[in-house]
Structure formats: C-alpha cells, structure tokens
Amino acid sequence: MRIFLNNPIYILYLSIFLLSLSPVKTSAADTENDPFEKTNRAIFEFNNTLDDNLFKPLAKAWREVPDFPRKPLTNLATTAKTPVSLANAILQLNRESIGNIIGKFLINMTFGLGGLYDIAGTQEFGSMPTVEEDFGQTMATWGVPDGPYVMLPIFGPSSVRDSFGIGVDAITNPLSFAYRMNGIGLEARLTGPAVRGVSTREKYLDYVDEMKSSSLDWYATMRSLYRQKRKKEISGELEEEKVSLNILPVDVYDDPKLEESIVATISENDSEIVKDVDKSLSVAKKVEKPIEKVIINKKTMPSDGYANPTTENKSKFIDNSEIIKIVQDESRKIMPAPRVYNGVLPSSSYPGFSKSRINLIN
Amino acid sequence: MHHLKKFFFVLIFLYPIVSYSDENLASSKVFVEKLGKQVVEKVSNTEITELERYNNFKKLYLSSFDNYYISRFVLGRYWKTIDKGIQKKFVDSFNNYIVATYAPKFKGWEGTFKAVESLFENNHYNVKMDILNKDGPTLKMMWKMYLNKNKEFKILDVNIDGVSMLITQRAEFLSVIKNHPNGVNGLIDAMNKKTDGS
C-alpha cells in the first residue's frame, strides 16, 4: 500500500479515476462532454504535428516493408497483448471473449510458430477474429461512466475512464513483470506497443487522410469517431444512432412549401436515375397496401410525415392494427411464441449487428 | 379441430404481411446493389470529366438519399432556430458539400457491392453489405433506409465499422456552429468554401 502511495504515477491515476466518477458540470447543450476542450484541442494540435512528422512517415515506410517480416512482426506484437486481453475478459466474465482469446492463442502458438502467423484467422480455422479487451472496457462493464473526453499526448483520443484503464493495463501486464525480472530494458519493452501503433496507423493511412481533407472541424470529427467506435467495442451496439434516429421529430416534413421547393430542385435533374431505381422496385410496388397498414401507427419514421393520411384512413389503419393484435393474441393461445431468429449472430462482424466486443479493424 | 381452424385462419390472415416483408427485404438489397453498380458506371469511370463525375454523383445522391431529412438531422437543434430561407440555403450548400467531398473519392475505384442481408428493424431497412475492393480489404457497411410514400427506398445513414456517417457529420457541424461567431451562416460559408476549393 505504501508503495502505491509513494509513487506519484499511482496517485495521478487514482486522481484521474476519482475524477471520472465525479459529476462534471456541463450545460444541457453540451452533449459532447468535453469540458477540457481548449486544452484537448492544443494537445490535438501537438499530436497532429507529431503524426505528420513522425508517425505518418513511419506508417508509410512500414507499408513498404515486404509481407515478410511485416506481417509476422505485427502478429507477434498482437499476440503479446493476449495476457492483458485475457485478464480483462475474465474480469468481465465474458465467456465468448475468453474462449476466443484462449483458442486463438493456442492455435497461433502451435500452428502459427509461436504467434508469428495468424493461422487462427484463416478460413481453415473459421476466420477467428482478434479480440482485444482492456481495463477501460472492463470498468465500463462494471458500470463506471466514461467521464469527460480527454486528448492524451501521443495516445490520442480517450476518456478519463479509458485513460485510467491504459495505465492499469500497462502496470498489470504480466509481460512487464517478466521483462523486469529478466532485466530487459525499456527500449525492448516498448517494441511491442510501437509495432502495434505503427501497424494500426498504417491501416488507417488512407482513411484518415480522406477524412481529414474533407472535414470542417477535424477535432470534432475525431471526437465523434472515437466515441462511436468505443461505444461499439464496449456494448456491441449502436445505441446512440438508434436513439438519435428514433427521437427525431415526426414533423421532419412539417413545412410542405419548403419540402415542395426542395423536392422540385431535386427532381429537376434526376428523372433518368429515378427511373432506373424504380425498375428495381417494381416488386415492392405490387405489395404496397399492407405496408401502410402495418407501420402507420408507429410514428417513428420520417416517411410518416410524407404519408399524411386522412383522418378517415387513419381510423381504418387503427382498426386494422387492432384486428392484427387480436389475431396475434389468439394465435399465442393456440401455440407458444416461437423463438424467432432475429438476424443477430454473436460473432457477426457487421456494424450494428455485433453483440461481441470484437475489434473489427483486426 | 377448432384450434387447427384458428391456426390456419391466423396463417392466412398474416400471409400478406409476411409476403410484404420478404419482397421488400429483397428489393432493399437490389436497391443498394444497383446503386453501387451505378456508382461504378457513372462516377468511378476514369473517362469522364470531373464535372460529369460531379453531376452524375449528385443525381445519384439526390435520388437515393433522403437529403432533406439528413440535412435537418445534421443541423440538430439549430434547425428550428433559423428561418426558412436559411434552411433552404443550408440544404443546398450541404448537398453540394457532400457531393463535392465524395465524388472525387470514387474516381478510378474498382470493385463490387454485394448486399449480404437485409433486416427490417424499427421501421427501417438495415442492409448489410460487403464492398469488395479490387485491390484491398473487403469493407463491411450497413445502409439504413426506408420506403417513402411513393414506395421508393431512401437512404438515411451509412454505417461503416460501427461509425455512423450521420452522427459524425452532426457532431462536426454542431462544433463548427458553436465555435463560429456567425453560427449556422458561418457553417454554410465554411461548406461553400470547401466546395469551391475542391
């Protein structure tokens, strides 16, 4: 305990952790939870300069390295992170992740020549994805809020909770103990994170350049990208998007005159393409009636604003939905509710469908 | 026997709904695949001029995306604070900004769009798609769309690897408005400047 209290780094992390738990004063409109924006922007500028002059050229050079030794080195660096991921998967009691991490590790350590080759990721072994868990995610599963957004020097976008997580992962990494016990210096210890960092930067080279060139506020874009990506890694869902779309006012098209003028502008040039698209939708048009009957009462689609049904029609739809409800209730009495496959596979890697915390980039 | 009758009655009654779902789910996949094909033919083509590329992409964007809804969404709470003239100006500038930003990115792109699965959730059609790059990794994305009153599919959002383009764009715009002394007008100016510069 004394060791912890005597070490300023531990005290710093403890302070950050406590800060993440404390409520932060933000205005109602300040939904981005970024009270340190001014400082964060300054650090972001520093990171960008560092990226332009160091990380980006390194990533470009890394891309030019032949597949051998580039891929084996990357795989080795990824495998070296396994103990941390496994420890966090256990802390989260995430059976799927635990199984995946152990399975992949064993396959790659044996058939993959000690982790040099990602054999488990090949089709023959079922294309096992690389699962990475960190202490930030673990704390999230324990209910710790992410806290204010922070921009870390070199590490980049993070939150108070995740910053604390990075520190805990670094301190508790079993490999760190092994390095220290065997007298391995800091330079050698940093090889793994450095290779992982450069490799990740290389993957995003084109994507980041494109986003940056078209962005009006690169800092705000990065903040949003980080938040969304992190949310998905933790919960496996796109909750924010669903909520955002559903809370939209149904009066999106509440101004018929403005809508008409915009639709008229749009229609001027696109008749040819609309025709093309219409052909592909001919099947849909044949069955157009039941569509309205089913969805008209839900009032969550922007198209509800388009339809503008008359009161008479509306009442018909309501009647119809009530009939459907009665019939469905009756059917439940005859037979139990079937288990419906909802299209969500635990290992699905499509955005919005994944229930696991699989790192899709890998 | 009585229960069996009821069961068949339920089946017959629900048949049109099931049929509607299947047909539209299939159509939603056809829609995005066709859109992808048109992008390759009319936007990626290296033999056309930049102006033709811009115009072709604009036509595809305006006919396939619900750009009015998107415009309103990305402006968030500020939409109601501006008058109708500025709203119209914003929609026009935003459309031009999107087209000018994305049209050049498709130049010379080669690959195919393969719709993998379509699901009807929360009144939206979510179509999962693989974009098979000719030279590069397969990109997995999801289209969020709906059927409008004319029974045309309109795209609301594109999600790539868990990142919603709609939410990202809104976060960026709200930040620009917050930090610009002219608010929404400042954002419109910034968009126009970017569009003119590209």
Image (spheres, coloured by chain):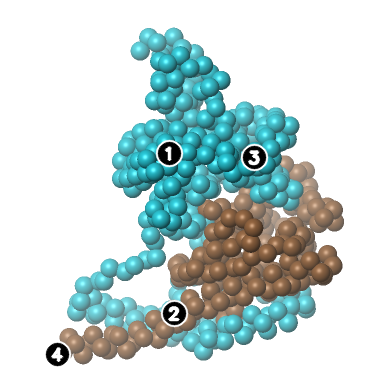
Residue at 49% across / 68% down in the picture?
A: B116
Residue under numbered circle 1: A113
Q: Chain of mark 4?
A: B
Name the residue: 62% across, 29% down.
A154
- Image side of residue B100 versus residue A106, left or right: right
Q: Colour of chain A?
A: cyan
Q: Amino acid at mark 2?
A: Asp
**Badge 1 and badge 2 in a common chain:** no
> Answer yes or no: do the residues labelled 2 and 3 have beta carbons within 8 Å?
no
The residue tagged with tag 1: helix, strand or loop? loop
For residue B1, which numbered disc appears in the image?
4
Tell which of A213 and A143 is nearer to you. Answer: A213
Q: Is residue A346 above or below residue B44?
A: above
Please name the amino acid that badge 1 sits on.
Answer: Leu
Mark toward the viewer: 1 or 2: 1
Q: Which chain contains the residue that carries disc 1?
A: A
- Same-chain status of marks 2 and 3: no
